[in-house]
Amino acid sequence: MIDLKDLDYDELTEYLVSIGEKKFRAEQIFSWLHKGAESYDEMTNLSKATRERLLQETYVSTLKIREKYVSKIDGTVKYLFELPDGNCIESVVMRYHHGLTICISSQVGCRMGCRFCASTIGGLVRSLTAGEILNQVIFAQKDVGERISNIVMMGIGEPLDNFDNVIKFLHNVNHEKGLNIGYRHITISTCGVVPMIYRLAEEKLPVTLTISLHAPNNEIRDTIMPVNHRYKIEELLKACKAYADTTGRRISFEYSLIHGVNDSMANAEELAKIAGPLHAHINLIPVNKVEERDFKKGSREEIQAFCKRLTELGINATVRRELGADIQASCGQLRKKVL
Ligand code: SAH
């Protein structure tokens, strides 16, 4: 059975023509699917015969809201979605002054093994299909009843470890007959799968690329991010430069401050040296406590001092505001609890 949300617009058109439908059906069906229709019966402009024909080989995929939490502090909404096979993923809707941003997952679990991260604890179960990635946006938007205008791929999983499905998802979510979310409003976050950064650059989509750097040198990065054994910081920075040169988009870095591991003044200075030439923006994130892990965040003053040092050295750095602190909104925490 085919989930029509796993097809892009052209593939959908081709499929419909192949079963004897007119081309314009693609626009109707695409639009219904992306508005969150949950069955062909809801697609009132399709004939009964068409609906029955579609049911022979295809289905309308959905996501079940298994748990939902709304932060009393800032209105952040966290979803634990259940996939058709019973696996769970997390998505988070955040309110910013420029509109709603959704943080979505790309895989069930993750095989990257970052030491501080809750998403990777049980390893990778499987990658999400293009339709499953998209469904998070569709069903969260349907549930909150407001337009979601920005997407960050910073939930569970490594997007560049599920490359083809992520690319198809990007095309579909950007399509004007669907949710029509601009590429510039989409951010992909990666722990640094270097060859895939080059492949993403070749796609020439003006999405924002952010790198989970978390260390200013190989010595530290090796101890907290296994991916660094494979691709060293020098190679990663070269790929970042190539990405920026090809797409014209500035790279940004995520840097989780872990007390006593990567948060000294010397670390800030080293970080400034590597971020400076790329004109990269640095997002500082006080590390979130994960039960199984022993990492701690520094004090507010220490975090501010780290940020100030970067700024003094000419780097554009900010400390990320913590949203949804009362609902375990950080990635992987909720799925793990339910498992
Ligand atoms: N695999 C991708 C997408 C996940 S994004 C990536 O690594 O970028 C999730 C972000 O949160 C990453 O920057 C990740 O390193 C960070 N993160 C994971 N666990 C964290 C924790 N306990 N505290 C702070 N940031 C964390």
Image (cartoon, helix red, strand yellow):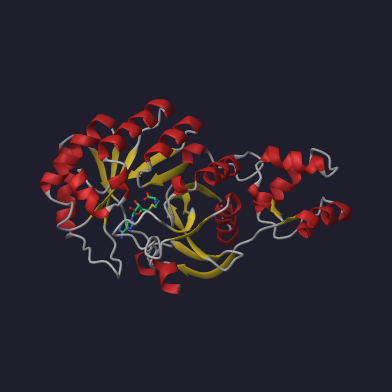
Q: Is residue 36 visible?
A: yes
Vertical comparison of 105 with 188: above or below: below
Residue 146 x/y as whole percent: 56, 55
Residue 310 shown left or right of residue 197 in the figure: left
Q: Quadrant of residue 55?
A: bottom right
Outermost bottom residue: 338
Task: Please name whichever residue, 121 or 304, is drawn nearer the observer in this view of the structure.
Answer: 121
Residue 326 x/y as whole percent: 36, 69
Residue occupying image coordinates x 63% and y 38%? 176
Residue occupying image coordinates x 46% and y 36%? 200
Task: Please name whichever residue, 268 or 193, is drawn nearer the observer in this view of the structure.
Answer: 193
Vertical comparison of 286 with 186: above or below: below
Residue 71 x/y as whole percent: 41, 66
Ligand 1 placement by image quarter: bottom left
Residue 263 x/y as whole percent: 16, 52
Outermost left residue: 266
Vertical comparison of 70 with 199: above or below: below
Vertical comparison of 329 with 11: above or below: below
- State the quadrant of the C terminus: bottom left
Residue 85 shown left or right of residue 108 in the figure: right
